[in-house]
Image (tube, rainbow, N blue to C red):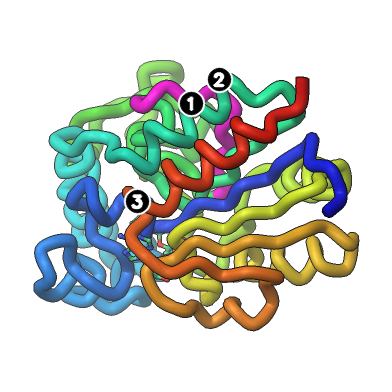
């Protein structure tokens, strides 16, 4: 097997499911997820925000409050350990807007879909750390305009920092996808890009995803079990 020095890891909602954060399709408690109680078009598009800003802000306020009560799980902790100990290049590209990778201690993290704990001022284009509700239209701490929105990438908007992601992928020897459905583009296309580049590909997921056929190997099981075991294996064969 080609020796592995540089790794790109994509994480999706599945890695945070065992921390009690709903994925798109199922609630963390087994019931309907917050997402299933709303149509995506009503809460996660720029059109929805123009049409009914209060509904959208309330939805994100609820999620922003909820993630602050959650804790990283064994999968986030294992990736933070890999980040700290891996001698080669490593990039954790996350579709998640929670901050559980950072709270576990990971540093090489890129949020391609933004972050719940940021507010974006559309008047002065400043991003500020934000833990409070936005529904009451608080002023931007920088310019004072009441133009703050959640700093999350909605459907129909361009994910962040794609150039950096593709450049990390071009230098990578291994692409790993953890708890991502393979349904949300462009993240779902990264595995195909990796294949075209001749990079080894591994998927860790609770069940087969829409993208499974594209991976060299898929391991099925909960992230809290699969990820620590995989990290252990990688560090055992670590580059020096
Ligand atoms: P998704 O909700 O569409 O799919 C979740 C995936 O995780 C599925 O493939 C499922 O099989 C897998 N999964 C569920 N529980 C798991 C577990 N315990 N261990 C391993 N895998 C598990 O998620 P997605 O592909 O990330 O797309 C959702 C979109 O919505 C993303 O763009 C993301 O920005 C956003 N989102 C984010 C969060 C978050 O920040 N935590 C939560 C929900 C949705």
- From which residue to which does the magenta span run? 103-112
Q: Is residue 174 above or below residue 239?
A: below
Distance, label 3 to label 1, CA atoms, is 15 Å
Residue 225: x percent and y percent? 35, 51
- Reply yes or no: does residue 95 show up in magenta: no
Please give the name of the residue rendered at 68% of the width and 34% of the height, measured from the top-left corner. 237
- Reply yes or no: does residue 111 show up in magenta: yes
Q: Quadrant of the image for the N terminus?
A: bottom right
Q: Quadrant of the image for the C terminus?
A: top right
Left or right of 206 in this view: 216: right
Please give the name of the residue rendered at 24% of the width and 52% of the height, measured from the top-left corner. 18
Is there CB contact under 8 Å for labels 2 and 1?
A: yes
Left or right of 52 in this view: 32: left
Badge 3 crowding class, 10 Å Cα cut-off, few under 14, some 14 to 19, many 20 or more, is few
Is there CB contact under 8 Å for labels 3 and 2?
A: no
Q: Mark 2 near ligand 1 (CB under 8 Å)? A: no
User: Mark 1 sits on what residue?
Assistant: 81
Marker disc for residue 163: none
User: Mark 3 sits on what residue?
Assistant: 225
Q: Is residue 120 above or below residue 207?
A: above
Whichever of labels 3 and 1 marks the residue nearer the N terminus, that label is 1
Q: Nearer the viewer, residue 1 or 29?
A: 1
Q: Disc count in the image?
A: 3
User: Mark 2 sits on what residue?
Assistant: 84
- Secondary structure at badge 1 equals helix
Q: Is residue 53 visible?
A: yes
Q: Is residue 118 visible?
A: no
Distance, label 2 to label 1, CA atoms, is 5 Å
């Amino acid at each position: 097997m080609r020796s592995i020095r540089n790794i790109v890891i994509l994480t999706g909602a599945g890695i945070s499911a065992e921390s009690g954060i709903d994925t798109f399709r199922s609630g963390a408690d087994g019931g309907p997820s917050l997402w299933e109680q709303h149509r995506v078009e009503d809460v996660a598009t720029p059109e929805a925000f123009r049409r009914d800003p209060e509904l959208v802000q309330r939805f994100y306020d609820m999620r922003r409050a909820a993630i602050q009560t959650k804790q990283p799980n064994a999968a986030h902790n294992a990736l933070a350990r890999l980040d700290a100990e891996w001698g080669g290049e490593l990039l954790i590209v996350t579709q998640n807007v929670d901050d559980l990778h950072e709270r576990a201690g990971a540093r090489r993290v890129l949020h391609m879909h933004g972050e719940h704990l940021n507010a974006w001022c559309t008047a002065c284009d400043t991003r500020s750390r934000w833990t409070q509700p936005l529904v009451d239209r608080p002023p931007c701490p920088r310019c004072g305009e009441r133009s703050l929105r959640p700093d999350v990438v909605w459907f129909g908007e361009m994910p962040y920092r794609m150039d950096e992601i593709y450049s990390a992928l071009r230098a990578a020897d291994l692409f790993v996808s953890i708890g991502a459905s393979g349904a949300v583009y462009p993240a779902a296309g990264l595995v195909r890009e990796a294949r075209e580049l001749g990079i080894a590909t591994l998927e860790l997921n609770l069940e087969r995803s829409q993208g499974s056929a594209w991976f060299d190997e898929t391991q099925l099981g909960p992230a809290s079990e699969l990820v620590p075991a995989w990290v252990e294996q990688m560090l055992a064969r670590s580059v020096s």
